[in-house]
Image (spheres, rainbow, N blue to C red):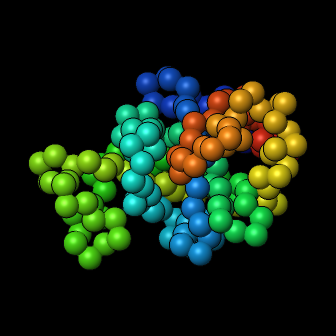
Amino acid sequence: MLLADEIGTKSGRDGIFMNYWLMKSEPEEFSIDDLKRVKREPWSGVRNYQARNYMMKDMKVGDGIFFYHSNTAVPGISGLAEVSCDSYPDPTQFNKKSDYYDAASTLENPRWWLVDVSFKRKLKRVISLDELKLQAAHLEDFALLRRGNRLSVLPVTAQQWKFILSLE
């Protein structure tokens, strides 16, 4: 049985319906099991302006997230998470030892923003990219399936969210 907040009926803060997202991570870097272990994690290191804008301007506390494993033998959606705080500057942009250091970014004018994500649950099984491709007709131009789309943060409609959860 699906929970109300998993099928798009839960209202977010101020009575506005929550948004839904897909966030990609390579499991060797950070997996759904890692998120389950730590419970909450800053989604740091995103260096694409569109993905940054989603986190900075559009993501709200309580928004649902499909946790997607990329660059693995079977890429796909492996779990559910949620946005657990408002956006704030990504501290890795200021750390000279970080792979994500940005010399042009300052404390007064940060370029890169993030949100924290919190673990909700692992899916009963991975919903693979191949399976999602087979269901493309039911997914109404799902951003993940668009040719050439490599963003690490993607919007998901309420209808797509419901349909994908029904595949579980």
Q: Residue at point 78% right, 59% down?
A: 126
Q: Quadrant of residue 59?
A: top left
User: Residue 19, position in %: x, y?
Assistant: 55, 33
User: Residue 29, position in %: x, y?
Assistant: 54, 72
Q: How many marks?
A: 0
Q: Can residue 163 be seen here?
A: yes
User: Residue 45, position in %: x, y?
Assistant: 40, 60
- Of residue 61 and residue 58, the one placed in the foreground of this image is 58
Picture quarter with the N terminus: top right
Furthest-front residue in this view: 148
* Picture layout, residue 124 above or below residue 140: below
Using residue 123 as the reference point, say whether residue 19 is left or right of it: left
Using residue 87 as the reference point, say whether residue 67 is left or right of it: right
Q: Residue at point 83% right, 31% down?
A: 138
User: Residue 144, position in %: x, y?
Assistant: 66, 43
Using residue 39 as the reference point, say whether residue 156 is left or right of it: right
- Of residue 59 and residue 138, the one placed in the foreground of this image is 138
Q: Residue at point 50% right, 70% down?
A: 38
Furthest-left residue in this view: 108
Using residue 73 as the reference point, say whether residue 167 is left or right of it: right
Q: Can residue 6 be seen here?
A: no
